[in-house]
Image: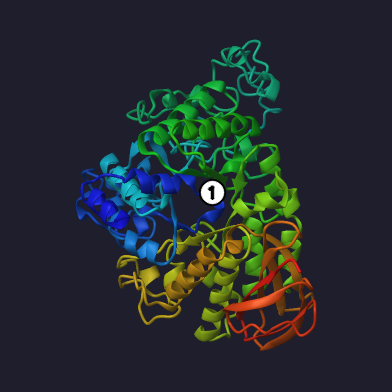
Amino acid sequence: MKVLLAATMLMAGLCPPAIAQDVRERAPTEEVIYFLLPDRFANGDTGNDTGGIRGGRLAHGHDPAHKGFYLGGDLKGLTARLDYIQGMGATAIWLGPIYRNKPVQGQPGRESAGYHGYWITDFTTVDPHFGTEADLKAFIDAAHARGMKVYLDIITNHTADVIRYRECPANDCAYRSRGDYPWTRMGGPEGQPINERFLGDAAEHQTAENFARLTDPRFAYTPFVPKGEERAKTPVWLNDPIYYSNRGDSFWKGESAIWGDFSGLDDLMTSNPRVVEGMIDIYGSWIDRFGVDGFRIDTARHVNPEFWQAFVPAMLARAKAKGIPNFHIFGEVFDPDAGNLARFTHVDRYPAVLDFAFQSAVQRVVAENEPPLVLAQTFFKDPLYAGGEGAALQLPTFLGNHDMGRISTFVRKANPAAGDAEQLARVKLAHAMLMLLRGVPTIYSGDEQGFVGDGGDQDAREPLFPSKVAVYNDNRLLGTTATAADANFDTAHPLYRYVAALAKLRQSEPSLRRGAQRVLAADTEGPGLFAVARRLPEGNRAPFIDTIIAFNTSSKPLKANVMIDPRIEVTKSLLGTCPMPSAPGTLTVEIEPFGTLVCAGAVAVR
C-alpha cells in the first residue's frame, strides 16, 4: 500500500510526506552517497544544451567534442536515471554545483566552460544548461519519494573570474601579502593613506563597525569590473570589489591559501561580516526553497575559520527549522593528513570533512602496493576528530574524484604490467574497503562502469551518456568491451553489481554502518592481510555482535591467523567462506588474491 501510494503521488508530482520523513530521520552514517556532475551524467533535454545563449561555443560553452566544455547532461536526464543510481544501493546523491555559471572564461586560446559548476555568477538560481528551478524541484521530490537524500555542492570561497587588476593586463597578478600591502595604504606602505582606522581582519576585528571603514579596495592592486560585466553577479552586492580580497593569485601556501584568488577566481573577503551574512542568506534560501538534505562545501580549507564558525551552525539551524534534523555538512579539505583534517572539525567546527586520509591510504595500499599498516595508521588517528572515534563514522570516504582522478587510473598507472583482470580485482578490493570500513561510502559516477581516465580534473570527467570526446573514447575501460562512446548505464557491469551487492550487505548489517571499528591485523612488510572488527553496540559488554572483515591486498592466496575476541563465535558467512575459530581468540582465514572475507560473529551472556 505504501509503495502504491508513493507511486501515485510521484506521478502527481507530489512528495509523499511519510517517505520524505523517513529520509529526514536517517542519520548521515546510514547513507551510501553517489557523486555526480550533472553535465556528465545524463542528457534528458537537448534543448538546453546551450543554456539558451546565442552564438558559438565561446559564447554558450557547449561543445560535445571538447572535454573542457558543456557536453549536455542536465537535471531531467538525472531524474530519469534514478532507477540506475538506486539500483546500485545509493541512498543519497551529492549533486555537483547547479548554480548559474559564467559560461566560458580563460585567456584567448585557453578558454574552457563552467560545465563543472564552480564558476558561479548567480548564486540564487539554476544554470540554464542544467534546466530550471522546476527541474531541480522535480528531481529532489523524485529522490525523496524513493527515500533518497540530495546533497548540494556549494561554494563560498570565490565567484567566477570577473574582477580584473589594472596592473596585470594578462590577468596573472601574483599574490601580495597583507604585510607588504596593508589595507591602510594604496599600493604599499609608502602609498597614499586609505581606509582610515581600519584595524584589519583578525578575529577580534571582524565586526560591522570595523569593516565599515574599509571603503577603498586599492590596497594591493587596482581592481575594476570590465565594461559590460558591472551587474554580472547575483545577488547585487557581489558586484562590488570591496567584498573581495583583491590580492592576486594564491600560491597555495601561507596566507595566500586563504586570501589569494583561486586560479584567478574572485576570492571573497569572507572575514567581512557582510559576506558572512550574504552567504548565510544565499544558501539558507536553497534549504528553504528545496528542502535539500545537506551540503558538500567546496574549497573549505581556503576560507578563514571564523566564517565557518558562523556559517555552519546557521545552516544547521535553518535546516532544523525546515524539519531536517540530520542535515549533513561535510567540507572539502584537500589534505591526506588525518591530523590536518581533524583540525577542521575542532577549529572550524565542521561536523565532517571528506576523508582524504582514507582515500590516500587505500590508494597507497591497493594501487601502489604499500603494506596494510598504512590503513591501520590512518584509523589510529580517528580519535583526533571532534567527538572522537565515533565522529569518524560520518566522514564521507571515497576512492577518487573529479579533481584528483579515479582509483582505476591510479591502479593502472601503478601496475602497468598487470592485465585487466588483475586491475579489475584491485579496483573491486578498493570498493570493498570503501563499502565495509568505517565512514560513509561515496562513489564517484563512472567508477561503477569501469571508467579509467587519463588523469585528474577534465581527464576524470567522462560522461555516462555517449561521449564525442576523443580523449575519452580511446580509454580502455575495465570489466566491459564498451567504450566511453557508448551509453554506460550497464546494470550488469561487474563493478556495478559488486557495489550493489556490498551496499545490500551494508544495509543488512547495522554494524557495517554504525559499528565501532577496531583493527585486528595489518601486515607491515608489503601487501598482505588487513582485518578489522565492526562492533554493535559500542563497547565490550555482552551481548554484542562483531562483524569481522578481512582483506588480502596481495596477488597471492593468503592464509593467516587473526586475533579476535575469544568470546566470539562465527555465526554465518556474509562474503566468502568463513571458518569457525580454530581456538578461542583465533580465526584462521583463507582469502584469494585481492579478495575480501566478511564473517558475522556474536557472543551471548553465558
Left or right, 399 with respect to 453, comes to: right
The residue nearer to you, when weighing 487 against 560, is 560
- Work out whether 259 lies above or below 295: above
> Element type at marker 1?
loop
In the rendered image, which quarter contains the C terminus?
bottom right
In the rendered image, which quarter contains the N terminus?
bottom left
Left or right, 140 with respect to 411, comes to: left
- Tell me where residue 374 sits by quadrant: bottom right
> Which class describes the residues within 10 Å of circle 1: few (<14), some (14-19), or many (20+)?
some
For the point 42% across and 36% down, the residue is 287
- Work out whether 505 lies above or below 562: above
- Work out whether 249 lies above or below 565: above
In the displayed image of the protein, which residue is found farthest to the front? Answer: 606
- Tell me where residue 253 sits by quadrant: top right
Residue wearing tag 1 = 27
Give how far across and how far down residue 189 sits, in percent.
69, 21
Left or right, 131 with respect to 574, comes to: left
For the point 64% across and 14% down, the residue is 198
Give how far across and how far down residue 128 sits, in percent.
28, 43
Report the amino acid beneath label 1: Ala
The residue nearer to you, when weighing 248 against 592, is 592
For the point 25% across and 48% down, the residue is 9
